[in-house]
Amino acid sequence: MRKLALHWQILIAIVFAFIAGLWMFSIKETTGNQPGVFGIEFIAMFDYIGTLFLNALKMIIVPLITSSIIVGVAGIGSGGNLGALGGKTLLFYATTTLAAILIGLFVINMIGPGYIDGQPAKDALSLTASVDEVVAKVGNKGAGDVAEIFVRMIPTNIIKAAAEGQMLGLIFFAILFGYFMTHLSHDFAEPLFRFWNGIFHVMMKMTEFIMKFAPIGVFGLVGAVIADAGLKATGPLAMFALAVLLALGLHAFGTLMLLLRFVGRVNPLKTLMGVSQAILTAFSTASSSATLPITMESVEDNIGVSNKVSSFVLPLGATVNMNGTALYECAAALFLAQAYGLDLTFGVQFTIVAIALMTSIGVAGVPSASLVAIAIILAAIGIPLEAIGVLMVFDRILDMCRTSINVWGDCCCATIVARLEGEETKVAL
Ligand code: ASP
């Protein structure tokens, strides 16, 4: 009998996890207690299984990012080549992120989830600070925290940066390392290249092994989330969640698929199917960093992108290119601004767009990371930070969705850059 493809197994695991999670949630709602056996709650078991899987993925991130970027950059060669590939990649990242933010801006402005019958939904959301207090702060648009992204890019201690998950610092170091390897004599460069390439290949083999456990891990992760929070949706918050989902969908199926079709000249649906494992894992883990090993495997094996391109574009993208996150940051800030009855001038909207663009670069690829960036935006437009509490209700489920779009954006970029570099790929038209 033919074995069911892994992405189907994962999808089925997600469906069962929703069913099991909703069952546990309904029991908790009616009895006040989480169900379990022998005094152990089911949710704790789900959480345990999920954590094991997530830890296994996280375990390989640091060696994977370091080795793949070093090999990628050193393999591209010196100066000009790196510049060309890097230039295309960064241009793609910047334009798609901006497009995502503008879609978020448009949809939230059109739907206006922060208003009820044209009035700010502040009370319905139990937001307490007075509007005057909020408006008084609008003038103060300091973007000091954005400058911090650049400071984090150059860590004082690379081991500490790795230990603390400061991927931006690690990436910067690895790019420099790879770049200067190309300046060494062959005697030194050759063994170094073999060494890092060997590590990279071991990491990919480990990924394959860990992925065998994905259906079980995903079942645990998603089940625990649903059992804890359920899928209760009410009032302005539900409207906001729907608006975010609509905007994410427009970006994923609109912007990105059009780019795939017309710039990359590939079949968008085939590309989507090819990377479905990565997207489903992103959905379940809500972490683009943890998904990175699977993203690389899918893009290389199923799309046919060369290792040269994927090992540069994808690790960079997992931290720097977050389409879904940028869209969400913008949508969330605008929603809260509406709910507070803030005058949404061009200045305020521009501030939101600009900070969402910049902070999405610095946001780590871990669950809920964008809440920090949203805090920066709220501070800049003068909304009290307590408002973030409102977003927590749906944060996890929306995080799962935006992370999927983050990873889909990375996959699209790798595919298009590969095509622009003259690669055939398996999904070409
Ligand atoms: N969880 C997201 C990611 O890993 C980041 C975020 O938006 O919170 O891509």
Image: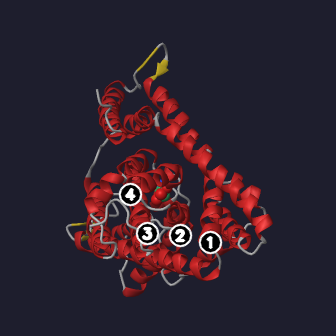
Q: CA distance from mark 4 to mark 3?
A: 10 Å
Give the residue number, with chain letter if any, for mark 2.
Answer: 361
As drawn, 161 above or below 397: below
Marks 4/3 in contact by CB < 8 Å: the verdict is: yes
Q: Earlier in the sequence, mark 1 or mark 3?
A: 1
SS for callout 3: helix
Residue 174 occupies which quadrant of the picture?
Answer: bottom right
Marks 1/2 in contact by CB < 8 Å: the verdict is: yes
Q: Earlier in the sequence, mark 1 or mark 2?
A: 1
Residue type pointed to by label 2 = Ile
Q: Earlier in the sequence, mark 2 or mark 3?
A: 2
Mark 1 or mark 3: which is in front?
A: 3
Residue 342 occupies which quadrant of the picture?
Answer: bottom left
Question: On the rendered structure, is 165 left or right of 191?
Answer: left
Question: For the point 53% across and 70% down, which residue is it?
Answer: 361
Q: 97 and 260: which one is in front?
A: 260
Give the residue number, with chain letter if any, for mark 4.
Answer: 303
Give the residue number, with chain letter if any, for mark 3.
Answer: 418
Residue type pointed to by label 3 = Ala
Question: For the point 48% across and 66% down, which residue is it?
Answer: 374
Mark 4 or mark 1: which is in front?
A: 4
Q: Position of residue 295 (x, y in %)?
A: 46, 53
SS for callout 4: helix
Task: Indicate the quadrant containing the N terminus: top left, top right, bottom left or bottom right.
Answer: top left
Q: Which mark is residue 149?
A: 1
Marks 2/3 in contact by CB < 8 Å: the verdict is: no
Q: Earlier in the sequence, mark 4 or mark 3?
A: 4
Question: For the point 36% across and 28% down, which residue is it?
Answer: 28
Residue type pointed to by label 1 = Ile
Q: CA distance from mark 4 to mark 1?
A: 33 Å
Q: Position of residue 198 (x, y in %)?
A: 66, 50
